[in-house]
Amino acid sequence: MNEFKVIVVMNEAMLKLLKDKNENYEKNLKIREYLKDEAFFFKISKLNAYKILQNVGVKQEQLEDVYNKLISPDVFYDLLNNKGKIKADDENLVIKYENYRL
């Protein structure tokens, strides 16, 4: 399962829910923009990632597991080698892995 796509869908569902309840959904609109970048979670701190995950509806007890899946080496290498969404020398990356797999 692609955890990133699940987060995108969760954010869209949260946007709809907040709109339907006439509650403020500005944060989720910003999150929608951030999530246009598949490498987004590699470019932010763990604390900020947790805040975003909470805003889209991830439960407190699942934060660590979901976060680890989003920033796993497999995801990193897929974005680097297969999708070209990450550049190995990108200075904006907070989380990096070696350029090769063992």
Image (spheres, rainbow, N blue to C red):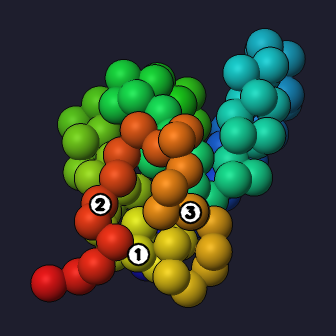
Q: Is residue 34 left or right of residue 45?
A: right
The residue lying at 78 percent from left, 13 percent from top is 24
Does any portion of residue 46 appear in the rendered image? yes
The residue lying at 23 percent from left, 82 percent from top is 101
Q: Amino acid at mark 2?
A: Tyr
Residue farthest toward the front in the current orientation of the protein: 89
Closer to us: mark 3 or mark 1? 3
Q: Amino acid at mark 3?
A: Lys
- Whether tag 2 and tag 1 are in contact, CB under 8 A, the answer is yes
Compare marks 2 and 3 and give the one earlier in the sequence: 3
Q: Is residue 20 above or below residue 24?
A: below
Q: Position of residue 67 (x, y in %)?
A: 34, 47
Callout 2: helix, strand or loop?
A: loop
Q: Is residue 68 left or right of residue 54?
A: left
Q: Is residue 35 left or right of residue 100?
A: right
Q: Position of residue 35 (x, y in %)?
A: 68, 48
Callout 1: helix, strand or loop?
A: helix
Q: Which residue is mark 1?
A: 77
Mark 3, other Cα within 10 Å: few <14 / some 14–19 / many ≥20: some
Compare marks 2 and 1 and give the one earlier in the sequence: 1
Q: Which residue is mark 2?
A: 97
Q: Which residue is mark 3?
A: 87
- Residue 2 bears which disc, if any? none
Q: Is residue 18 left or right of residue 38?
A: right
Mark 1, other Cα within 10 Å: few <14 / some 14–19 / many ≥20: many
Callout 3: helix, strand or loop?
A: loop
